[in-house]
Every structure is written in structure tokens, then in C-alpha cells.
Image (cartoon, rainbow, N blue to C red):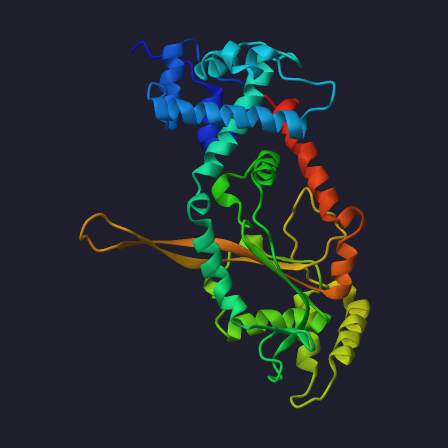
Amino acid sequence: MNFNYRFDVNMLESLVGGLSVLDIHNLKIQNLDQAHSFIKTYGYDINKAADEKLLWNYYRRAVTYINTELLNEEESIPESLADPNKLQSIANLLIYASVKDQRENSIQRWACAILKVMHVLVHLDNDLFNQYSTKIQDQILEPIKKYLVSDSVSGTYLGNPSDPESIPLKKFIVKPYKSSTSSITKLLAKPDAVAFTILDKIGVRFVTKHLFDVFRVMRFMMDHHIISFPHNIPDQSNNTLYPTNLFLEVMESFPQGSELTVNEIDKILDQKLQEAKERAMYREKLNLFSSKNYSFVKFITRRLIRIELPQEGNEKNKELNFFYPYEVQIVDYETYLKNLSGEASHEEYKKRQRQRARLRVLGHIKC
């Protein structure tokens, strides 16, 4: 038989080669009919006014993001692409992105850049969190806040201060929602990231007074059923603060009934680390943008979220159930202060992330 022996390398690499659509070299759209079909398969019918309006909105947001977050002062998107009146149709972006001209400042390169950011925006806007952010956060935080006790005299505790198992905290921080700009940058910077793998849209940070208390926070959350460890996402766990194996050895060396102060325990832990650091077993998940000096305990767990969906008429309300992830960070105060400065600081982290996003959108990697 006379088969067609030509295959699109980008299609194969994207479907089974592990290549992100943001990293393919070019599209293969030759005319408006093909562009309209591509967009419809993607999820939008450009012939419908509502869908076309949505796509133009994504386009404008993408252009704004590139201009404000990625470009240097002397750089600018070509007017033929930056001006919607000159672009005329969103479909034309796909045709420009299919031109075989990958010179540094070509129309093809800029069309790809806009499409990459639009793709990220589409996935962010259609994530469950975007639809139910308040209800998701309330259901995740309620079991934690139930055990937080604060007053102007004794400060903040996890648990009732009169309970010997309660833990004094220097700080309890609820991470603010990631802004649209922050989320776009994160997705562009990480080749394996898509909207539903942004696992830290909701997060909390416990800052304890002592190193020993970092581990006590984890035990408290388990013992009081704040978290369910079967819902943990194992490959997201981090412990660059203190090796678990050495911690357990120290704990097992104390006879039951030993009366030690937290300061004494911290000193013993420090001494153990100095003596046995060659056996220290940390758990480090590689993050290209984090400094090696950043120390913390972190895990991602999930909670079953229940959203009541109102029905029309006399129909009984239905319930939408789904698991949603959130991040828990725990760190002692001394380490927390160190993490605020130098290469470990959040500002430097974001700077490295933006640099990678710029390279991926505008650099040598083209669609």
C-alpha cells in the first residue's frame, strides 16, 4: 500500500516523548481553516462570539505579561503582533508560529512567545482553584486554625498552652494566593509544570522557637487528625533542615521519663549532627530556583474538598468532591531568619525563576 511515511516530530515528541508543548520547535498550520480546526480541538470555537472574546482576552493578557515581566527596555513585540487591529484574528498567531523562520527576532519567534503565555493562562483560568478558591482555602485551613491559640501575653501556640504537648510558635503564616503573574512565571519556568501541578497555591508555614519543635509540629498534626498521611504526595517532600535518621537516633537514646528542656534537646541534636554528619540522610527535592542554603521541612498533602452545587427548581443540591493539595512548611526561627537573606531569599528565588521563564519564552527554545 502507498502509506504516508511522514510524521510530525513535534506531535510524537509531545505525545510520547515527554516534550512540553511549550518546547516544540514550530507549529504546522498553513491556513485559516487549519487554524480554526486546531483552536476548536484545543477547546474554543472561534466562530462563537463568547469564545472569540475569551481568546482575545488571553491574547491581551499575554502581551501585557511579556511586556512587563520578560522584556528589557530596548525590546518590544512587533506591532503586527502587539496591535490586535493589525493582527486581525487570533488564528493568524498560529499561522505566524508555523512560518519556517526562527531567526532571533522573527515574527515566528514572537508569535510563539505570545501563544506560550496564552496557553498557560488558559490552564490557570480553567483550574478548580480559580473557580472555588475561597471554599477550598476555608476547608483546608479550618482544621489547622482550630488548634491555633493566640493572645497578647503568651503569644501563639499550636494547641492549648496549658497542654504539655502544645507547641509555642514564633509565627504562623498563611501563604498568600499566588498572583496571576507569579503563577504564569512558575509554569513557564518549569518544563514539567502545568496548572494542576502547581501544588502550593495554598500553603502554611509554622515557624517554631526550637529545632525540636519542628518535628513536634508534624506529630501534633498527625495526632490531632489535622492531616492524613495517606494523602501525602511523596515525591514533593523536602527535609533539608535536620536528617530524620539522626533525629530518631537521638530520640531513641532518651529513656522514657527523661526530663529535658527544649534547649537541652536542641543542643544534643546539634552535637549529634556534628558527630555523625557523614551519615546524615536528608530528603531534597531538586528545585532549579532554590538556593542550596535554603533549609526547611516541607510536604504536600491533600484534603477532600466538598462543594455544594445549587440545582434549579426543586432538585436536590448535588455535591462536587475532589482532592486538593496544599503545602506545609515548618522551620525553626533561627533558620527562618537565615532564609530571609542572601541567595536563599524569596526575592532571589523569584529573580532566578523570571530569568528561566524569559529564556523559555524568548530564548533558544522555540515553538
Q: Nearer the viewer, residue 51 or 301?
A: 51
Q: Quadrant of residue 62?
A: top right
Residue visible at 49% across and 27% down in the picture: 58
Give the farthest residue toward the bottom: 257
Vertical arrangement, residue 127 with respect to residue 294, above or below: above
In the rendered image, which quarter is residue 273 located in? bottom right
Can residue 37 be seen?
Answer: yes
Residue 23 in sight in this render? no
The residue lying at 75 percent from left, 73 percent from top is 269
The image shows residue 60 at horizontal and vertical percentages of: 53, 24
Above or below 177: residue 295: below
Asked if 324 appears above or below 256 in the picture, the reply is above
Left or right: 283 in relation to 73: left
Q: How many marks?
A: 0
Which residue appears at 58% of the width and 45% of the height? 178
State which quarter of the image contains the C terminus: top right
Q: Residue at x 54, y 28 (%)?
A: 61
Q: Point out residue 174 in the picture as x, y percentages from the top left corner.
A: 59, 58
Classify residue 251 as left or right of residue 302. right
272 left or right, relative to 183: right
Locate the N terminus by quadrant. top left
Q: Position of residue 364 (x, y in %)?
A: 65, 22
Task: Identify whether 58 is placed above or below 238.
Answer: above
Q: Nearer the viewer, residue 47 or 344?
A: 47
Q: Tell me residue 197's x, y (percent).
A: 51, 44
